[in-house]
Amino acid sequence: MLRLKRANVPAGPTGAGRDVRLRVPAYRWRLVGLLAVTQTVGYGVLFYSFSVFLAPTAASLHTSTTVVTGALTASLLAAAATAVPVGRWLDRHGGRSMMTAGSCAATVLVLLWSRVGTVAELYVVWIALGVVSAGVLYEAAFPVVVSWFDAANRARALLAVTVVAGFASSIFLPLAGVLNDSVGWRDAIAILAVVHGAATVPLHILIRRPPTRSAPAPTAPTAPAAPTAPTAPATPTADRAETIRRALRDGVFWLLAGSFVAQSCAVSAVSVLLVTMLRELGHSPGFAATISGLLGVLSVTGRLATTAAGRRWSVGGVTGATFVVQAAGAALLPVAGHSTLGAIACVLAFGLGFGVSTIARPAMLADRYGTTAYATLAAAWNVPLILVKALAPLATVALWHTAGLTTALDTAAVCCLLGAIGLVFSEQIRPAARPAEQLG
């Protein structure tokens, strides 16, 4: 009799998922590993390699590098326009189908990029790549990671993905350069397309949705009305809609968005123009390029340091402090950046916050609003962030030419300070009720 009772216990709602939940820790860290690989390859091929092929593409199409660069700007704008629909899809269906299909499409589009014969074809390909990228890069990977991890482990999981992917430029810029010199830009891009498809498509197929908790509330199983009251199919949608409504009406949601957008203005502008800025300050092209290359390594260092500090202090407070250090680096660059040591110190200060917001945003968003509608809410932030990424460098160049380099860098410093102030204020306003996590 005792044996029968024990056999029957796992047959209920909690027991049905017991074997699955026992395998959750092992799978979710494998998931982190596979996404770290796909994000590294994705960013390397779909973003960083563009700069290597910029000049040869322009020469082959008999146009200027400015015109070719416009294709990347158009791609980022297309990604911004796609962000919200992609977020809604991810909340409802998970990441497997979108990321797999997106990887296939991106591979085909990169192959088409290698064969473009006109500027119009280049723009069509890159606008399509912008749409596809919204479904395969961080904007899609982060919701998948967040859905699998609770608050205690989420930061470590996001850190693991971004630390590895932070080396995408260090891997793919030299690789693209070697391929370009060896086989020409068209065949080099074709080879990278094959690498992208071989690495990302099979790994994205392995993505699964996390086992959900049995509905947290049927405490009266014997009540006759229980089957009709929960309306199981409608509950996730209703919870998601309510979470979205609550967040969009919350001033802190928009305060956080504004804080990250302000800091992103500075990061987007300085990272793109840093080599030119250092040369303006009197440094050689080789020195300027070498020091600017530290930004990728420093982004990893900053993420590691922020995650470690976040175990003792709040993520918002640590991130805000990092933004202040960034502001100091930007403001001091035109003053102290004429010397070698001064330039290195300023770049180090600015670079430490280079990738911090990448892991702070998902951690703070999920901590305050839960994971039920994470992808949709993250998309609401991603739209202005992508727009800033596309437009801030152009605005900074215009400001530089009209008011001078010092004014441009001081403006970047003010943007970092505004981001820090917003995060500090947001820390003072705690959410009224913490949403239930999807996974314990």
Image: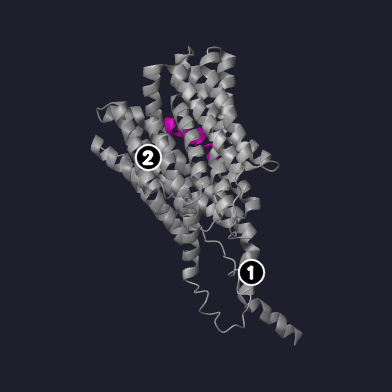
Tell me: residue 146, above or below residue 20. above
408 or 112: nearer the viewer: 408
Quadrant of res 305:
top right
Tell me: residue 424, above or below residue 266. below
Percent from the top left, x then y, of residue 89? Answer: 42, 57
Q: Quadrant of the C terminus?
A: bottom right
Mark carried by residue 409: none
The magenta span reads 164-178
Query: Is disc 1 placed on a helix, strand or loop?
Result: helix
Distance, label 2 to label 1, CA atoms, is 43 Å
319 or 390: nearer the viewer: 319
Whether residue 411 appears in this view of the structure is yes
Whether residue 199 appears in this view of the structure is no
Residue 167 within the magenta-colored segment of the rendering: yes
Which colour style is shown?
Answer: one colour
**Badge 2 density bin: few <14, some 14–19, many ≥20, Cα 10 Å:** many
Tell me: residue 322, above or below residue 43. above
- Residue at coordinates 50% horizontally, 63% vertically from top-left? 239
325 or 1: nearer the viewer: 325
73 or 288: nearer the viewer: 73
Residue named by callout 1: 19
Residue named by callout 2: 76
Chain-order first, disc 2 or disc 1: 1
Percent from the top left, x then y, of residue 237? Answer: 46, 64
Query: Is disc 2 placed on a helix, strand or loop?
Result: helix
